[in-house]
Amino acid sequence: MPPPPPVIARTKSATMSGPVVNSATRVGTLVVQAPHEKGIVSSVSQLLSRQGATVLDSAHFSDAPTQTFFQRLQFDLTGLNDRVTLERSLRETGERFNMRWRVWYGDRKKRVAVFASKQEHCLYDLLIRHRAKELDCEISMVISNHPDASPIARHFGVPFHFLPVTPETKAKQEDAAAELIDRAGVDLIVLARYMQILSPGFVARYPHRIINVHHSFLPAFIGANPYRQAHQRGVKMIGATSHYVTSQLDEGPIIEQATVRCAHRDTVEDLVRKGRELEKNVLAAAVRWHLDDRVMAYANKTVVFD
């Protein structure tokens, strides 16, 4: 049986600096991916129990065509003996079951960088939801290739970085963005209608840590001007898609999608207006689920635990 693709990301420890969540949210989350094999569920549960962690919630799924097993567990951190020992035990179990895994301790919030250009509706929506505590994270910065979003970031008290880009300066601009991201310890990059195509090198630096929103129901109308393409085709339904970014434009693993009816009287501008609501909703959902460690990517698609 071939090993699962290496899609599980880094382990984070609460010893890192950052905002501390109150004691009511002292919950750890463990996600697991492995070839489907008898005994893996009990082995992982017993491992947590031996380390003093009480399992609060568990969900799992087996993909029959690929014989791949996925599991998400949440556990109480209060009785956990030692995080270093827990992760050592996870590594040992991982070797036994050819298992990929990641663990997150809830007493540190994930850090998010938002990339934006001139269209501001998704950026506004994310910042409003964050202020309303719908997104449990720290928004560390807004990065834009235009200065237009500076007043918005300032209003919400978020650091703003203006990084203009041209075809000739693209590599240097991305290097500057990566330096800001790495220095801040950013865990997730969100493209809130960022109208630049990221280079394969930049994308490879943050695998399954960049979420984009595309203003069509993928795989339909990939690329530029999808609302105009939809209008020209006379479609009766338009959509929006949030997905992880890969080196293939608009072809990364899909996280969430939504649609709305349209009519023959709708202009391109009508489609844009209708689509903006979809874009905001599917992007916010994808960000929230990623922050909650509910999304696992494999074979260019995702498992999203509800």
Image (cartoon, rainbow, N blue to C red):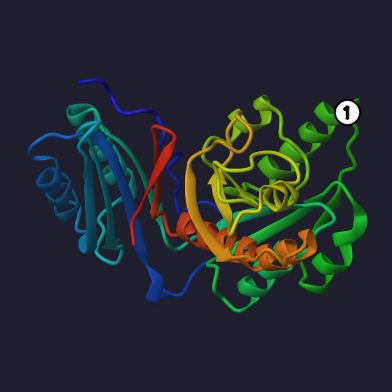
Quarter of image, res 111: bottom right
Quarter of image, res 64: top left
Identified at 56% across, 36% down, the residue is 251
Expressed as whole percent of the image width and height from the top left, the position of residue 123 reads 72, 63
Expressed as whole percent of the image width and height from the top left, the position of residue 7 reads 41, 34
**Residue 154 makes an appearance in the image:** yes
| Left/right of residue 269 with respect to residue 229 in the rendered view | right
Callout 1 crowding tier (Cα within 10 Å): few <14, some 14–19, many ≥20 = few
Identified at 58% across, 59% down, the residue is 236
Q: Is residue 306 above or below residue 189?
A: below
Q: Which residue is mark 1?
A: 167
Residue furthest bottom as drawn: 132
Secondary structure beneath disc 1?
loop
Of the 4 image quadrants, the one containing the N terminus is: top left
Question: What is the total number of numbered labels drawn onto the structure image?
Answer: 1
Q: Tell which of 47 and 8 is nearer to you.
A: 8
**Residue 109 makes an appearance in the image:** no
Expressed as whole percent of the image width and height from the top left, the position of residue 101 reads 33, 40
Expressed as whole percent of the image width and height from the top left, the position of residue 299 reads 39, 32
Q: Is residue 34 above or below residue 158?
A: above
Identified at 71% across, 46% down, the residue is 229
